[in-house]
């Protein structure tokens, strides 16, 4: 019987993190999901966040919102439109 050692890079590839996450989500070296409300900023460890909920008497599931992600996406979209309008002299 052969055993294969699994690593974080394989997880990122399997779940195609780079394709869909847009820099907001990642897998840390411990194999836990992190979210960065602003890409390229330090992430929030969702596993540890869930543990803190349980430690404070909250039961899962819990809805966690990251309004900075929406704000950043709208900002990025507006910037793309502004650049396109400038390129097309609109």
Image (cartoon, helix red, strand yellow):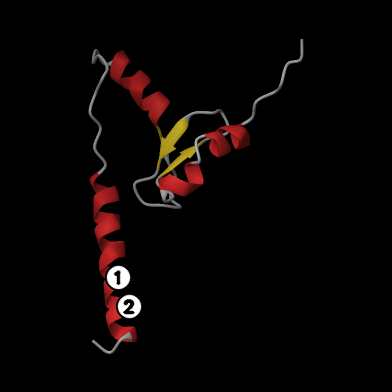
Q: Quadrant of the C terminus?
A: bottom left
Tell me the quarter of the picture where residue 44 sits: top left
Q: Secondary structure at mark 1?
A: helix
Query: Which residue does the image show at 36% across and 51% down from the upper left?
Result: 38
Instruction: Tell me, yes or no, whether the two marked residues, 2 and 1, touch with CB atoms within 8 Å.
Output: yes
Task: Name the spot of residue 39 as percent of width and height, x first.
Answer: 41, 52
Q: Residue furthest bottom?
A: 89
Query: Which residue does the image show at 57% across and 39% down from the upper left?
Result: 13
From what the image shows, is residue 41 above or below residue 10? below
Task: Name the spot of residue 65 as percent of width and height, x first.
Answer: 24, 37
Q: Is residue 46 left or right of residue 10?
A: left
- Closest to the observer: 61 or 53? 61
Query: Which residue does the image show at 43% across and 36% down from the upper left?
Result: 34
Residue 79's tag is 1
Q: How many marks?
A: 2
Tell me the quarter of the picture where residue 80 sits: bottom left
Decide: few, some or many residues near mark 1? Use Cα within 10 Å; few <14, some 14-19, many ≥20. few
Query: Which residue does the image show at 61% across and 37% down from the upper left?
Result: 9
Q: Residue furthest right?
A: 1
Where does label 2 land, which residue? Answer: 83
From what the image shows, is residue 49 above or below residue 40? above
Residue 46's tag is none
Q: Is residue 76 left or right of residue 10?
A: left
Decide: few, some or many residues near mark 2? Use Cα within 10 Å; few <14, some 14-19, many ≥20. few
From what the image shows, is residue 31 above or below residue 67? above
Q: Quadrant of the N terminus?
A: top right
Task: Name the spot of residue 51 as percent of width and height, x first.
Answer: 37, 19
Tell me the quarter of the picture where residue 61 sits: top left
Task: Name the spot of residue 7 as percent of width and height, x first.
Answer: 64, 30
- Closest to the observer: 2 or 86? 2
């Amino acid at each position: 019987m052969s055993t294969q050692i699994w690593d974080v890079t394989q997880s990122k590839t399997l779940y195609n993190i780079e394709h869909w996450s847009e820099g907001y989500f990642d897998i840390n070296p411990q194999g836990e999901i992190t979210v960065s409300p602003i890409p390229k900023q330090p992430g929030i460890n969702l596993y540890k966040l869930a543990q803190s909920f349980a430690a404070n008497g909250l039961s899962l599931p819990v809805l966690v919102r990251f309004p900075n992600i929406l704000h950043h996406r709208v900002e990025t979209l507006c910037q793309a439109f502004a650049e396109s309008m400038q390129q097309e002299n609109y």
